Amino acid sequence: MGKKKKMKYSGIGGQAVLEGVMMKNREQYAVAVRKPNGEIEVEVEHYVGVAHGSKALNLPFIRGIFQFADSLILGMRSLNYSASFYEEETEEKASAGKARDKALKDKADKVFNAVVTVVSLALAIGIFMLLPYYITSLFEDYIRSRSFMAVIEGVLRIVIFIGYVLCISLMKDIRRLYRYHGAEHKCINCIEKGRPLTVKNVMKSSKQHKRCGTSFILFVMLVSVVLFFFIRVDNPVYRVLLRIALIPVIAGISYEIIRLAGRSNNILVRIISAPGMWMQKLTTREPDESMVEVAIAAVEAVFDWKAYLYEAFGYEVDDSWLRDDDEPETEEEDDV
């Protein structure tokens, strides 16, 4: 058995979409979708971010706020693109009418996306931030310790989040989305482990990754427990406003933690990452080879993995390895 390679940060990240995967590398991203006819469609676009060129992107704890906003925007764009292949076909019209309707539809889609994003954020804040506080406040007459109340609120917030993930995982479409989520992780793990990006190598890579959005959300929950434990106000209205106002702070801190986790593998980082890795057992599923093919197409559209393997691991990919669909060294599944 070959020597086990140490994982090395590649800089690529991604997201599962409807019947596909989005992969991002720097300012370029690709969405690969398995169309109803079985073909893989890949779209490559540029996205510079809401704070492009700003010095704030170099400031720890501040940059995470903008990264969070970018992930929401890019995620919505990618999901809409993948869904467009599965929309019901409308009756054909004259070419002039079709052009006019397309322009109107594009404008309507932008407005709709903005509304959906705002409503989704409002629901997320209400369910995961304010609801736990409200439920906990019902016990104020029975529990006098503010510290204990803060802990109960935090535990309740995590329980609600886990319950939400479990509930949506019962949906058939979500379970399939989770399989593409697994394919996305497997591709990144395959590359960062120093393996040629082939279907066989990807399939035996881990479906869990420390930079996953699931881990980020769980970090948000855990960080909020700590902040609300130490930062307190007496007025109930101010408590609610405080929980909303601190969301950017919580997101900034959580981003720095997950950023560190993606670049280090020491024992402390592994301990901190463990809860998120456990949580990913609920939000990822094993993909099949056709799903992995889609994920690989997304990676190769924006990332030169052969050049990366040469720079990071010091070897060139021989075409014979690709023909054999195997890696140069036999390894077991990643332990990440």
Image: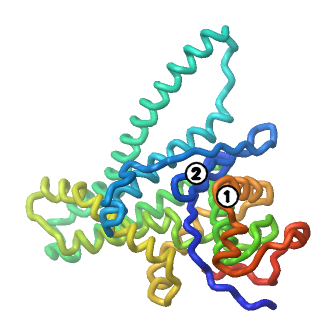
Q: Quadrant of residue 204?
A: bottom right
Q: Is residue 59 above or below residue 30?
A: below
Disc ID at residue 117: none
Task: Indicate the quadrant containing the C terminus: top left, top right, bottom left or bottom right.
Answer: bottom right
Name the residue located 62 percent from the left edge and 63 percent from the top edge: 284
Q: Is mark 1 on a helix, strand or loop?
A: helix
- Percent coordinates x, y for residue 271 in the rendering: 47, 85
Q: In this view, does 5 lie above or below 275?
A: below
Q: Mark 2 points at which residue?
A: 29
Name the residue located 79 percent from the left edge and 66 percent from the top edge: 198
Task: Indicate the quadrant containing the N terminus: top left, top right, bottom left or bottom right.
Answer: bottom right
Circle 1 crowding by C-alpha within 10 Å: few under 14, some 14–19, many from 20: many
Viewer-closest of 13 and 76? 13
- Amino acid marked by disc 1: Val
Q: Which of marks 2 and 1 is nearer the N terminus?
A: 2
Circle 2 crowding by C-alpha within 10 Å: few under 14, some 14–19, many from 20: many
Q: What element carries label 2?
A: strand
| Count of numbered labels shown in the rendering | 2
- Percent coordinates x, y for residue 56 in the rendering: 31, 60
Q: Mark 1 points at which residue?
A: 299
Apparent side of residue 108 relative to residue 189 in the rendered image (left or right): left
